[in-house]
């Protein structure tokens, strides 16, 4: 099987690297309704499980040292499957949960625009700082996720790690790796069951090898 990434041997030898395989969970029930699930523990569909099985095949030759996951079942149950070929049990990380969408949880986009048009527009006007009532802003999410990611990667210097996360969580991680601002959060696509690959180097730089693959 061809490797997922062709390493830059010169940079790897010079500064070392920790490789992150970052997955978004598989498709969930109600996916076509454009509903804000947030931290609700929604179930995977049959296709969602098939997406995990495909990822299992793609990742089986990767020399993973550890598997981490959001503790929500749509991530954690899939992480168990992905860890099987490597003899690894996933470690649940509550800090990797999806953006807390507060009072919007369970509401569709259409319902939200009809019932709370001012809130909807306020968020569009300031996607980084607007905090949904009883929820989080993207800035809050970034301050929660990025330190947690740093902590879980630190024991695996020069190793390979798998993280199973959510759409918003993954976007925050990818923007940080790219050095891009949070304002660009919706300029990155994260499809159900997608794979991203990021290398973190000792000199503080990072390289995104694969995005939404």
Image (cartoon, grey):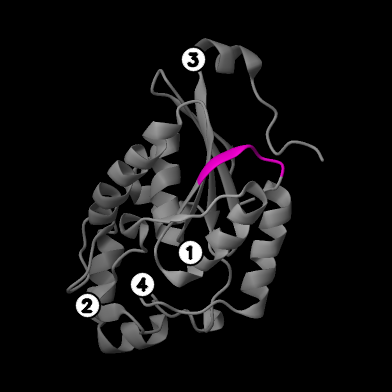
Task: Specify few, some or many for label 1: CA neighbours under 10 Å numbering under 14, 14-19, or 20 or more.
Answer: many
Query: Which of the two discs, 2 and 4, labels the residue nearer the N terminus?
Result: 4
Image location (x, y in percent) of residue 68: 45, 51
Asked whether the viewer can see residue 189, the reply is no
Q: Residue at x 58, y 40 (%)?
A: 64
Task: Point out the frontmost of discs 3 and 2.
Answer: 3
The answer to whether residue 113 is above or below residue 70 is below
Rendering coords of residue 59 (x, y %)? 67, 47
Residue at label 1? 76
Label 3 vs 1, first from the N-terminus: 3
Identity of the residue furthest to the front in this view: 87
Which segment is the magenta one? 61-66
Marks 1 and 4 in Cβ contact (< 8 Å): no
Alpha-carbon span between mark 3 and mark 2: 49 Å
Q: Quadrant of the N terminus?
A: top right
Q: CA distance from mark 3 to mark 4?
A: 38 Å
How many angstroms separate mark 3 from mark 1 (CA)? 32 Å
Q: What is the count of numbered marks?
A: 4
Q: Which residue is found at the position 53% from the left and 10% from the top? A: 14
Residue drawn at 41 percent across, 60 percent down: 70
Query: Which numbered tag is attached to residue 15?
Result: 3
Give whichever of 154, 173 is nearer the camera. Answer: 154
Question: Which circle, 3 or 4, is nearer the viewer?
Answer: 3
Residue position for label 2:
118
Nearest the eye: 81 or 48: 81
Mark 2 is surrounded, within 10 Å at the Cα level, by few (under 14), some (14 to 19) or many (20 or more) other residues, namely few
| Residue 38 image label | 4
Q: Earlier in the sequence, mark 1 or mark 4?
A: 4
């Amino acid at each position: 099987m061809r490797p997922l990434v062709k390493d830059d041997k010169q940079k790897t030898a010079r500064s070392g690297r920790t490789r992150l395989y970052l997955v978004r969970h598989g498709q969930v029930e109600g996916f076509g309704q454009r509903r804000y699930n947030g931290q609700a523990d929604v179930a995977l569909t049959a296709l969602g499980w098939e997406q995990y099985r495909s990822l299992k095949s793609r990742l089986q030759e990767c020399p993973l040292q550890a598997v981490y996951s959001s503790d929500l079942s749509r991530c954690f149950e899939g992480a168990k499957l992905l860890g099987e070929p490597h003899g690894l049990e996933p470690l649940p990380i509550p800090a990797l949960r999806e953006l807390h969408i507060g009072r919007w949880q369970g509401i569709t986009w259409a319902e939200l625009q009809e019932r709370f048009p001012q809130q909807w527009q306020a968020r569009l006007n300031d996607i980084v700082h607007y905090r949904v009532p009883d929820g989080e802003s993207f800035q809050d999410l970034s301050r929660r996720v990025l330190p947690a990611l740093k902590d879980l990667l630190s024991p695996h210097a020069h190793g390979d790690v798998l993280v199973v996360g959510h759409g918003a969580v993954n976007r925050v991680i990818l923007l940080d790796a790219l050095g891009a601002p949070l304002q660009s959060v919706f300029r990155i696509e994260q499809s159900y069951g997608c794979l991203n690959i990021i290398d973190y180097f000792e000199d503080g730089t990072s390289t995104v090898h694969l995005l939404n693959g």
